[in-house]
Image (cartoon, rainbow, N blue to C red):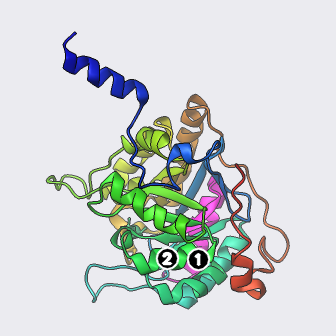
Amino acid sequence: MSDGACVEARVVERGVNVPQSYRLVRRDSRAERTIVRLSNGATFGGDEIAICAGPCGVESAEQLELAAAGVAAAGANVLRGGAYKPRTSPYSFQGLGEEGLKMLRDSGDRHGLGVVTEVLDPRDVEKVAIYADMLQIGTRNMQNFPLLREVGASRVPVLLKRGLSATVQEWLLAAEYVLLGGNENVVLCERGVRSFDPATRNLLDIAVVPLLEEMTHLPVIVDPSHAMGIARLVPPIAVASIAAGAHGLLIEVHPDPANALSDGAQSLDCEQFALLMRRLALVAEFAGRRMPQRVKPSAGGANGQRKAEGAVRSSKSGVRLA
Ligand code: PEP
Ligand code: MN
């Protein structure tokens, strides 16, 4: 063996070299892995995976309710849907704003689902936290530092998507901002990066799932919908993500994808999603993980106190167990 090969072997043996600049997110900064828990019982980071599903955008109460009923019946435990949409064109559907947030909370409670939704503006963090269980930082905002600081101060669980062309280091340092602000409830979400090849919407970097497992104690989930951009390619990549060790998935589901106001081409309908969930149950077992436990909505909604508690409740939500 040449000297070069010896050096390489030693590096591999020691695992990935993680710079000291990630003080709080690095794997060896704590003994246990982080488990992020939502108030409906959904967990990210433990043996049980989290399945977040729903439309790209909240379009109407009826559309959202159909989606929520469909994904809950199939076994998802978190409802996704954008009330504030980051659209490339200012002329595209921008979301329903606070009306959409209310619809998310109502449908989420009706079906015992946690709610994750994107916050675009630091000034909206407190308002979105009144309705949502988890704040999504979208790919276009991964390095919006004022926004990262604001969600860091909120204590509500954060879903931090990888930036359009962010390196793993930049992504982890974005998470570091949130932890430094005092919020340890961060889940990373791989959703594909820009590449030279337009054959799929983005290029899914599935390698980060086992890589981040070594580098950080934070949970990692995969969004195959925005990675592929083509609905029929979503199920096999969702299955592969769980097989690779992802702690959950974010999947776009619309009751009528052909008429969706955004991202219809990559959205599954409720039937396709139910079929995918059956395939996922098989692969989860193989990967040593459990599918989400069914949560029964309580009378008056699983989160009846939420609106009254508002931002104060936020500071108590999302417990780091481990
Ligand atoms: C979304 O989840 O609908 C979204 C806009 O995602 P991303 O930030 O990954 O593009
Ligand atoms: Mn979308």
Disc 1 within 8 angstroms of ligand 1 (CB): no
Discs 1, 2 touching: Cβ within 8 Å: yes
Q: Nearer the viewer, residue 145 or 111?
A: 145
Q: Which residue, given by chain and number where applicable, does mark 1 sit on? A: 153
- Using a 10 Å C-alpha cutoff, classify the residue at mark 2 as few (fewer than 14 neighbours), some (14 to 19) or many (20 or more): many
**Where ligand 1 lies, by image quadrant?**
bottom left
* Mark 2, residue position: 149
Q: Residue 48: name its quadrant.
A: top right
Specify the label residue 187 is tagged with: none
**Mainly helix, strand or loop, the magenta region?**
helix
Q: Residue at x 62, y 80 (%)?
A: 129
Amino acid type at circle 1 is: Ala
Depth order, front residue of 2/136: 2
Let me know if residue 241 appears in the view. no
State yes or no: residue 249 in magenta: no
Q: Position of residue 322 (x, y in %)?
A: 70, 48
Cα–Cα gap, marks 1 and 2: 6 Å
The residue shown at (26%, 58%) is 201
The residue sitting at the right extreme is: 299
> Which residue: 44% across, 58% down?
268
Report whether 162 appears left or right of 8.
right
As helix, strand or loop, the secondary structure at mark 2 comes to helix
Instruction: Specify the segment rendered in magenta.
Output: 59-80
